[in-house]
Amino acid sequence: MMARLRKVAKEEGLPFGERTRTYNSRLAQELGKWAESKDRGDAFHRAVFRAYFAEGKNIGQIQILKEVAASVSLPRGEAQEVLESRAFKESVDRDWSRSQALGVSAVPTFLMNGQILVGAQPYNVLERFLIDCGAKQR
C-alpha cells in the first residue's frame, strides 16, 4: 500500500516522506471542520497532509495540530479550545455516518449520480467516470 501511495504521490508531484507509523487523524478531522468554518479549510487540509505524509508528524497530538493551524494563519489559542472542547465532534460524526450510509469504505471515494469509484485513479479513469455518470443523469 505504501509503495502505491508513494508512486501516486510522485506522479502527482505531492510531498510524501518515509512514514513508519500511522496516527489517528480524528482530531485533525475535527480541526479541519473548524478551519473550513474560518474559510481556511483548503490551506489547513494541505498543511495537515504535508505534516502527516511528508513530515511524518503525529497529527493526533494537539500541539502538532496547533502548529499546523498557526502555519495557515489560524489562531493557535482558538485551535486549542476547539480541540479540547471537541466542538466539531458531532459534525465529523455526521460526516462519518453519511459516508457509511453511502457505502464509502476507502479514501478517496468518488460518488456521482449513485455511482462509486474507489481509490486514487489515473486521469483517464476519472474522466471516463465523470462522462459515464453525466450521461446517466440525462
Image (cartoon, rainbow, N blue to C red):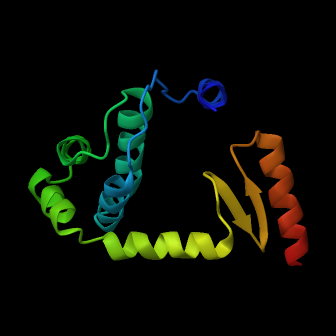
Quarter of the image containing the N terminus?
A: top right
Q: From what the image shows, is residue 20 above or below residue 44?
A: above
Give the percent coordinates (x, y) of residue 66: 19, 47
Q: Nearer the viewer, residue 122 or 92?
A: 92
Q: Relative to residue 131, is residue 55 drawn left or right?
A: left
Q: Which residue is most to the left?
A: 77
Q: Is residue 127 above or below residue 4?
A: below
- Is 87 drawn above or below residue 68 in the view shown? below
- Name the residue rendered at 38%, 58% in the picture: 29
Residue under the image location 38 percent in, 42 percent down: 23
Count all numbered tags in the image, as a single digit. Answer: 0
Q: Quadrant of residue 135?
A: bottom right
Residue 11 quadrant = top right
Q: Residue at x 24, y 48 (%)?
A: 69
The residue positioned 43% from the left and 37% from the top of the image is 22
Q: From the viewer's perspective, tell me whether residue 78 is left or right of residue 58.
A: left
Which quadrant holds residue 70?
Answer: top left
- Asked whether 56 or 114 is in front, the reply is 56
Percent coordinates x, y for residue 133 in the rendering: 84, 66
Q: Residue reaching furthest top? A: 18
Query: Residue 98 vs residue 104: left or right?
Result: left
Q: Furthest-front residue in view?
A: 21
